[in-house]
Amino acid sequence: MDESELKEILLTLVEPNQNRVTLPPNVRGWSEQSDEQVCYWTGITCDPIDNSITGLNLGDGFWVKTLLGMSQTAEDDSARHYLDRLLGYEEIKDLYLQRRRKAIDSIDTRNQRNLQNDKAAAGPTFPAALGKLKTLRFINLSSNQIQGPIPKSITDLPNLEIFDVTQNDIIGTFPHIQSDSLMVLDISKNRFHGPIPKRLFGHPEIGADTAPYLKSIVKFDISHNGFNYTIPLNGDSGFYDKEIQAEAVLKNLQYFDLGYNLLTGTIPNNIGNFASLQGLFLENNRLVGTIPKVLYRGSGIGANPLPLVQLFLQGNMLSGTLPSGLAELPNLKELYVDGNKLTGTISPNVCNKGLNEVFVNDEAEHDKCDNVVCPANSISLEGVAPCTRCEDDGSAFRRYLGQRDSECRPKMSEVEILDLFFDHMHGDEWLDQGYFWEAGSPACQRPGVECSDSGKVTSIRLPSLGLRGPLIPELGFLGELHSLDLSNNFITGFVPSEFRFVDKLTDFNIKGNQLQGVIPVLLCITEGINSNGVGPEATNFDLLYTCDNIACARGTYSDFGRAIVPTEEDVDGTQCMPCYDDEATYFIGRDSCTDILIGGLQFRQDDIRHGVVYTIFALFTLAFIIHLVIMARRRKKYVLSENESRSAQHPNPLPLQRQDSPLSVEDDEYEEYSDDDWTAADSETGTLTKKVEMTDKLPAIA
């Protein structure tokens, strides 16, 4: 590609404002009148041998503010500051991977950013013309207000090593970069959405959407977006190569950032395979379960503790205790676990590691453990030091570590819990207004509520009443609750792990709702709920203690919305079965499935409906092709028979003549033959009955 072609491609980036923007004197190139070679333009890097363009470094708003002249103010001299810190390619490769903890960003704020139609300042669309520069190795277009999707011409660039488009307004699903040498992927702080592709990491098997850069990737940052569903790393290890007895891919990954998304499920154990991982950032998602041991033990043959320096897990729904084994991480400097549902105490070994000194003010006098997370029965705005101790009033709401609050709130009564539940479930819109709960009314006098002789709530039954909204965790603090039936409503959100604290809960029915995610692990092993852990001695342990006893997982169903533990040794009970319809795919606790069994095979109803249309179309197409074949064969048979007839009448046929030959015959001297020139009887015997004699039309032979 010659100089003029390169210049033409680059100028498409500034074409909209070419005539009205005056570039600063220290910006080289980027105009039609410039005589500078493109390799000397500001932000452009070229190969020293063949002068091909290898790098485009227009990040930190340089493209949109300086080259396009958009959103520039007197106070915002970004061009001058940015030019002072333009990096060369080799410097960009040597990235500073550590990240600083920022102020708390609530889930509600993140939802508004990613899921609503909020409008950022108008900016340019992604420059698709860059896809013509096949030699590009790094692209930095961060903080440029870019809107719209990433063009395929960009994701198809074969040699990309660094792709940084952080802090724009880019939309779409996860981009499939096709370069097998990508080292840095940073698409953070945009508007991407949808699930992370199931086979992106080659897990549990290689697929069409598996990233080709798994052996080279060093930094993987998709934080501050709207990605949902689970982290696709569970299952049998897709990283371990049995032939070479070593990790085949992701061995170079040092920075793995999925924070500030809408991810659900648990922390995958296979993160323990990332032998070079220094920064793991999963904060402010909707993850449940416990902190896995593989984070400080590693996994695989000859596993060692991960070389983690930073571990950010705050702002999730993790439960259990804070593992003392985290003290075994030799390089750990920052650990944040506040804003979860962790209980217990902090191991002195963890406290004495001197963690979080960058974030916490060490000059203040406080317990070393507070630097890690505030203890139970205390509060803090950030969940870490300085922590305020609360009075011990027996409140179950302050049993968690690292609670974020501005004040110590008093213990809630059962009446206050029911009022809160009624408000969150939009009680004024319930289908049967006979179930209306007056605020502050005695708990035992409310329709659907039953109490013990001592006045404690023991049962709440509100099936098929049109309840909608998220389940409040405070229900888990109704200590005498035996039965909770909220089936066949429109309840959304996730199942709170607080239900594990209700020791007497035996009947828990949430089937037929719109609940997402997974059942919290500690709830799955809580004995007694829906006969969980209770059954004959010979019963398979996996059937006794399973999350399916609480609610069928996403993608499965049963008539009860959950599994039923066998009550006798010769009874199989009920298990959750696979289901592929949309309802079961999205929600847990499904009690119906629209799939259809055909010949023992299971099909989605929509697939069958679409399949019938495709089948009918295919049959019509096949019938038309068969018709054409039959007609062609008839024609061929007719011609062969005619040739045989000619040969019999003229043993010495005329030689083929040119059109201008005296012996040539004009077309209009022949009568056209048609299918009417022969009968069915003729076709059966192979003898053609002529209605026109060809010999009468041929010229005489001398």
Image (cartoon, rainbow, N blue to C red):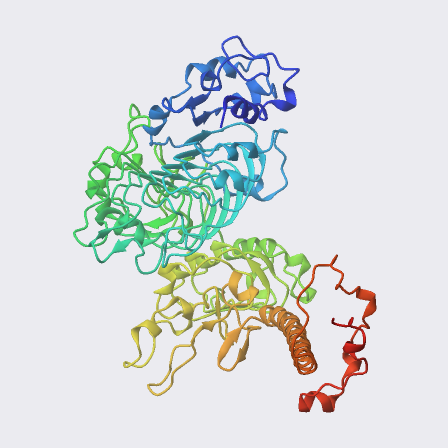
Q: Using residue 535 as the reference point, say whether residue 122 is left or right of it.
A: right
Give the percent coordinates (x, y) of residue 665: 77, 65
Instruction: Name the quadrant containing residue 437.
Output: bottom right
Q: Nearer the viewer, residue 89 or 464?
A: 89
Give the percent coordinates (x, y) of residue 457: 50, 64
Residue appearing at x 45%, y 35% in the figure:
104
One can see residue 417 in this view:
yes
Q: Using residue 563 as the reference point, say whether residue 661 is left or right of it.
A: right
**On screen, residue 631 above or below 177:** below
**On screen, residue 183 above or below 679:** above
**On screen, residue 232 above or below 481:** above
Q: Nearer the viewer, residue 197 or 345?
A: 197
Residue located farthest toward the top when viewing the structure as drawn:
25
Q: Nearer the viewer, residue 351 or 6?
A: 6
Q: Nearer the viewer, residue 523 or 123?
A: 123
Give the percent coordinates (x, y) of residue 254: 30, 38
Q: How many marks?
A: 0
The quadrant of the image that shows the C terminus is bottom right
Give the percent coordinates (x, y) of residue 356: 30, 32
Residue appearing at x 77%, y 79% in the figure:
675
One can see residue 348 in this view:
no
Residue located farthest toward the left when viewing the structure as drawn:
302
